Amino acid sequence: MRSFAGRDILSLKEFERNEFFHVFEVADEMEPIARSRRNTDLLAEKTMVTAFYQPSTRTRLAHEAAMHRLGGHVTGFADAKMTRAGDFYQESIKDTVKMLEFYGDVIVMRHFQQGAPHEAAKWASIPIINGGDGWGEHPTQILTDLYTVLTEKGTIDGLKWLAVGDMRMRTMHSLGYAMSQFDCPITFVSPPDMSLTDEFRTELNQFNVNFNEVEHVEEAIADADVILVEPVVQPDYTKARDERTGELDLTPANYKITRELLATKAKPDAILLHSLPRMDEVPTDVDITRWSRYWQEAFNGVVMRMALLALVLGKME
Ligand code: CP
C-alpha cells in the first residue's frame, strides 16, 4: 500500500480498497480520544492551515477540532474576502499556497472552483486536503460516511445504498468513485435537471459501479440498507457565496425522506445519513427515529479528520 505520509487527499477516484480500510483502522485508533473528549500531543509539532474560499461549518471546524484533539496548531482563513485572493489583487492559487506552505505543515482547502485544491497541490510542498471543490469532490466527507456505515453496520460490502439529491453535488461524485471499491449496489434519485452528468455516468460504468437511477425515493427505499441524502434545494456551489433571495422552493416528495416514509417503507435496520446542512428534505421529526445516524456522522467527521491528519503528517503509518 502507498504511504499516506506527505500525500494529498484530493479525490476518492485514486483511493484503493486497502487504503479505505487502512484509514478506517486508524480512525478506530483515534475514536477513543474524541469519544472521551481528550486532547493528546500526537501532532504537537504540526500546524494545519485552513484556506476556505466558500462557507463551511462542519468541514473547517471538524478539521480544526481534529487538530486540537491531536495537540496541533491551527491557522488560516474562513473568508477569502479578508485575504488578497478576495480583494483587488485576486491573488492566484499558486501565489497563495506558495505563502501558506511556510505557515504550516498541511493545508485544508475549500474552493468554489472545481480543481482548485489540485492546482494548489501542484505548487505546495506540503499535503493538500480537499475540503470540497465546486461541484467536484468532497473526499473527507464520504470517508466519514463510509466509516459511519462500517461502525454502524459492521460492514460496507453487501449493503444496498440509496443516494438522494443533486447528483452534480461533490459528495455524490466522491461517493460514486468510492463505490467502485466495494460490493454495494447503489440507486440514485434526483430531479431530472440534477441527474448524473453524462461524463460521471460514463466514469461510473468504466469503474464498474453497480448503479441504477429511479425517479422517486418510494421506488427504492424498501431495499436500501443505507440511505444517503443531500439537498435538492441548495446554493450554486460554483460561487464563493450564494445568498438566499425571494421565496424558497420546497423539496418535492420524490426526494424527501419523511418519518412516515421511513416507518412504512424502509427496512427497520436501514440507516439514514445526511452530511448537512439540510433544508426540508429530512424533516426534523426524523432526528429521533431509529434510522437517523447524522449526529454519529458528525462525530465521526472529527474522528476521520484526526485519522487523515495523523496519516498525511506521517504520525501514523
Ligand atoms: N457537510 C459539509 O461539508 O458541511 P459544511 O459545508 O458545513 O462544511
Image: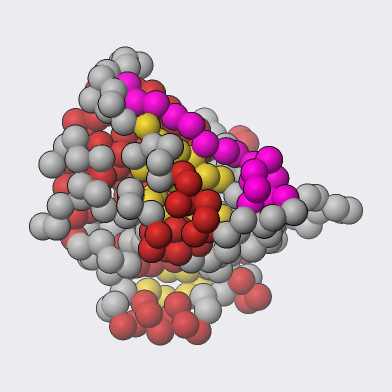
Can residue 90 be seen from the camera position used here?
A: yes
Q: In the depicted view, which residue is nearer to us: 159 or 49?
A: 49
Q: Indicate whether 293 appears above or below 199.
A: above
Q: Quadrant of the C terminus?
A: top left
Compared across the picture, whether 292 is left or right of 248 comes to: left
Compared across the picture, whether 149 is left or right of 155 comes to: right
Q: Residue at x 34, y 39 (%)?
A: 105
Q: In the depicted view, which residue is nearer to us: 152 or 83?
A: 83
Q: Is residue 106 magenta?
A: no
Q: In the depicted view, which residue is nearer to us: 16 or 172?
A: 16
Colour convention of the picture: secondary structure
Q: Looking at the image, which residue sits at the far left?
A: 1
Can residue 271 be seen from the camera position used here?
A: no
Q: In the depicted view, which residue is nearer to us: 57 or 212?
A: 57
Q: Indicate whether 34 appears above or below 2.
A: above
Q: Indicate whether 212 appears above or below 303.
A: below
Q: Quadrant of the N terminus?
A: bottom left
Q: Residue at x 15, y 52 (%)?
A: 3
Q: Indicate whether 180 appears above or below 68.
A: below
Q: Which residues are magenta?
A: 71-87
Res 223 quadrant in image: bottom left
Q: Residue at x 25, y 61 (%)?
A: 15
Residue 293 spot, x, y in % from top left: 43, 38
Residue 314 spot, x, y in % from top left: 19, 40
Compared across the picture, whether 279 is left or right of 76 comes to: right
Residue 181 spot, x, y in % from top left: 23, 65
Q: Residue at x 24, y 49 (%)?
A: 6
Res 165 quadrant in image: bottom right
Residue 182 spot, x, y in % from top left: 23, 63
